[in-house]
Image: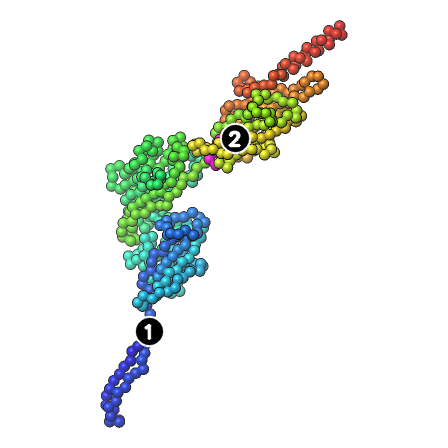
Amino acid sequence: MYMCKFSGYNSYSEKSVTQETSPITISYIVKPAVIEVPRVKILNELYDTPNRQFPIGTAITLTCRGQTIRWCAKRVSEFSFTGLPQTPIHSEASLSGCQYTRSSTITYNLTDVDTFTQLLCESGYSVTEGSSTTRAPSTDDASENNDTLTTDASAQNIQIQPLPPTVNYGENDLVIVCSITNPSQLAAVYFIELQRNSSTLFDGVVSVVTGQTSPIQWKDFALRNRASATASIDSPSSAQLRLTIDKANVQCPSDFKMYKCRMSGFSSIASESVSQETSPIIISYIVKPAVIEVPRVKILNELYVTPDRQFPVGTAITLTCRGQVGSDKSNTIRWCAQKTNEMMFTGLPQTPIHSEASLSGCQYTRSSTITYNLTSQDTFTKFLCESGDTGLCGTGTAIQYVNISTTVTEGSSTTSAPSTDEESSTINSPTTNDTSENNDTLTTDGTSASGTIAGGATVLVLLILLVV
């Protein structure tokens, strides 16, 4: 508070006078001058993360410390910042000198429109978003006066991409690309490196370095023998590093690890050197089944597998098939059947009993068993077991067959349907009804079709002799 006081001589009263004003308080306004760069944390995690690239659907919290803070955002398709609808959680304000300081936290859910989103916190703002007196400096979007705050909810200046995103093992090349996402923010790129996880550390695989006689520098010499790399580093707009492993040379699972990219360059915004790296990614893959065994046949409740493929009507048999089911351990083996009067295979209604899946390399293997009761309609029934199925029966990538026929007792004679087991040991190679010399016949019943016909002919001859 201030007041004024004076003394003098009053010409009217011809006396000395002393007077003072009433005290006044000098009011003031202090504009915010300092604010922190937002800290990023995945929702419900304990610690801040240095990552700025997250999967769609991730919920993150952003915390900024300054004075009377507002949050705004600008997506890649937008021309200006707009205020966020989220309600911030503000801490109590604490006084330091003439400035009050507090923190502000919002929760933000990343969606498919956040391919590259700038998030801004500011204090001392007016009506228009981004018109504050204080916005914290940021490595992503900073002027010479360090008065701009943005935090990317996607990539920074470097990104990593697997091509394709999910590799079909044995069908696709494995391609990993490190590229620059914001070339306008860089005056030069000096170095790009691809790294691969080994145990707890990331080791360099291959890099491209400016100013070298041979710009591509291999660090994983074993991989160099079965892979290739191309790179460009002349301009930020075209700078990239691409690793390609031919599909014939991809090793599973050793090549499907965590990878990340690193870069260094010179920022045209901050006028200083920058070094950044991506968050690690895992290369996902799909392995299709390739091998499955011929179904094994056993009469229900018997201990051992039988070589027979012809049984009396009413016999209950179990069929067991063991084979690969692919890279997903939840995959199973499917059973289908085709009777004599049917044009195609159809799925069996029986519920199979599946064993636990066991992993070997990149393939899971399991067995599947069904119980089937033979009826008079099973005069000649083909059974199919398959894995890697994509729809209709017979579309699997690993298929095997077994043919079962029935015998019918009529008085003292026995008739049977011809039975030839035409299982092929070749994957995904369906059998035909006609038995050829090259068919891989499992086994047949003791009484063959030709033997039955011959027996009938003998009975006919005896009848003729009796008549004579």
Q: Nearer the viewer, residue 369 or 234?
A: 369
Q: Residue at x 59, y 32 (%)?
A: 347
Classed neighbour count for the residue bearing mark 2: other residues with Cα under 10 Å, few (<14), some (14–19), many (≥20): many
Q: Is residue 374 magenta?
A: no
Q: Is residue 403 left or right of 1 when viewed as pictured? A: right
Would you say residue 284 is visible in this rendering?
yes
Of marks 1 and 2, the one in the foreground = 2
Residue 187, x across and y down, in percent: 29, 49
Q: Residue at x 67, y 21 (%)?
A: 408
Decide: is 181 above or below 94: above
Q: Secondary structure under badge 2?
A: strand
Residue with the mark numbered 2: 367
Q: Residue at x 27, y 86 (%)?
A: 19
Q: Marks 1/2: CA distance?
A: 84 Å
Decide: is 271 above or below 340: below
Residue with the mark numbered 1: 27
Q: How many marks?
A: 2
Q: Nearer the viewer, residue 255 or 73?
A: 255
Q: Which residues are magenta?
A: 324-328
Residue 452, x across and y down, in percent: 65, 15
Location of residue 260 by image quarter = top left
Work out which quarter of the rendered image holds the N terminus and state it. Answer: bottom left
Location of residue 26 by image quarter = bottom left
Would you say residue 378 is visible in this rendering?
no
Q: Is residue 357 left or right of 209 when viewed as pictured? A: right
Decide: is 299 above or below 231: above
Identity, as a three-letter code, of the amino acid under mark 1? Ser
